[in-house]
Amino acid sequence: MNRILADPALEAQPNFEFPAYAAWLNAIVAGGPTREAALEQMAESWRLERQERIVLWQQQSEEDLRVQQEQEDQERIAKEAEAAEEQREAEKKKPKINDFDAEAVVADVLIPRPSQYALQKIKSMEYVELWYFSPEGCWEALDSCRSTAEDSFGLAKVDGYVVFKPMASFKASQKALQDHDLSWRQFDMAKTSFLIHIDKCGWPDKHQQALALFFTLITNHEHRMRTRGEKTLLRYAGFVRREWHDRLAQNQGFNIGIFNSALYNTLSDDVWEAERDESIKLVYTSAESSLHD
């Protein structure tokens, strides 16, 4: 249907006595009605046709209003969605801080904080030397840690993607010791801090329990009282924990909480042989020095 361009209600009735309507008037009169009756018939026909167009005009106006309203609604919804997306993006960029318990107080004992490097390793569930969790490691982290350094970022490859990571998370300490080079005191204190931090980082309970048992078996081992007992136990702890992480990465993990006495005995022999060789070397060096004197 063609659009009606103007409101028919505003139209004035034509003068049907004008020459333009003569043919129509004469055709009606030829049928028998008088001229006056014919003019009235023409006027009535126009009024009926006009009323039909008024109804169509109203329908057209209502449809136009509906379409306009739909367009306005769609534009409003689109703008609201765009504003909501901008708000979400702004929220993502906004610094986040968690809520706190208004009734809680700080703990009676604060666990020393290791370096960002060590914490990042823990968060990634990767191997990291226990030294970082010892008092010496935490003190070294406190001395070297600066907020500006922690705010610096560098590129790193994670799961095939290049991402920005804190520079502090890349840097290993040059003072770090291997587990078997720790003193027994350092080892004992570091493993406690280590277990606390892996719990904070949400390590699986199964892994935490296995590690807790692993450390318990070592620190309570009966050979601690032997001459080379602690030294051998430290070597066992260092080698086995690193091997555990390597195997986990290869999906060949074993239960680190089961103490392998055969491996321990082998390491004990290695320690004894190393000390024997060192003693022989010292004797040889001393004898050679005496000859030169």
Image (cartoon, rainbow, N blue to C red):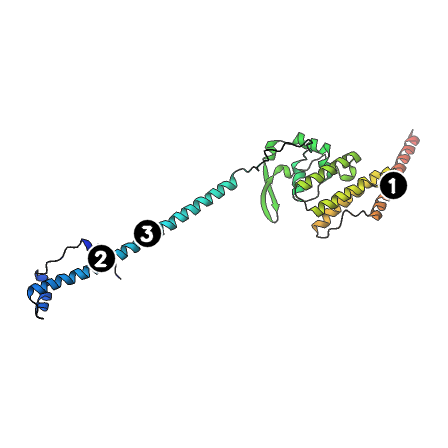
The reply to whether the C-beta atoms of the residues labelled 3 and 2 are less than 8 Å apart is no
Q: Where is residue 237 in the image (x, y as percent from the top left)?
A: 78, 42
Q: How far apart are marks 3 and 2 (CA)?
A: 21 Å
* Residue located beneath label 2 in the image: 54
Label of residue 272 in the image = 1
**Identity of the residue drawn at 91% across and 35% down:** 283
* Residue located beneath label 3 in the image: 68
Q: Earlier in the sequence, mark 1 or mark 2?
A: 2
**Identity of the residue drawn at 6% across and 66% down:** 34
Task: Please name the amino acid that badge 2 sits on.
Answer: Ile
Q: Which of 130 and 79 is in front in this view?
A: 79
Tell me if mark 1 has few (under 14), some (14-19) or many (20+) residues whose alpha carbon lies within 10 angstroms of its own: some
User: Is 141 left, or right, of 83 in this rendering?
Assistant: right
Task: Please name the amino acid that badge 1 sits on.
Answer: Trp
Residue 123 seen = yes
Q: Position of residue 141 (x, y in %)?
A: 67, 33
Q: How far apart are marks 1 and 2 (CA)?
A: 112 Å
Task: Please name the amino acid that badge 3 sits on.
Answer: Gln
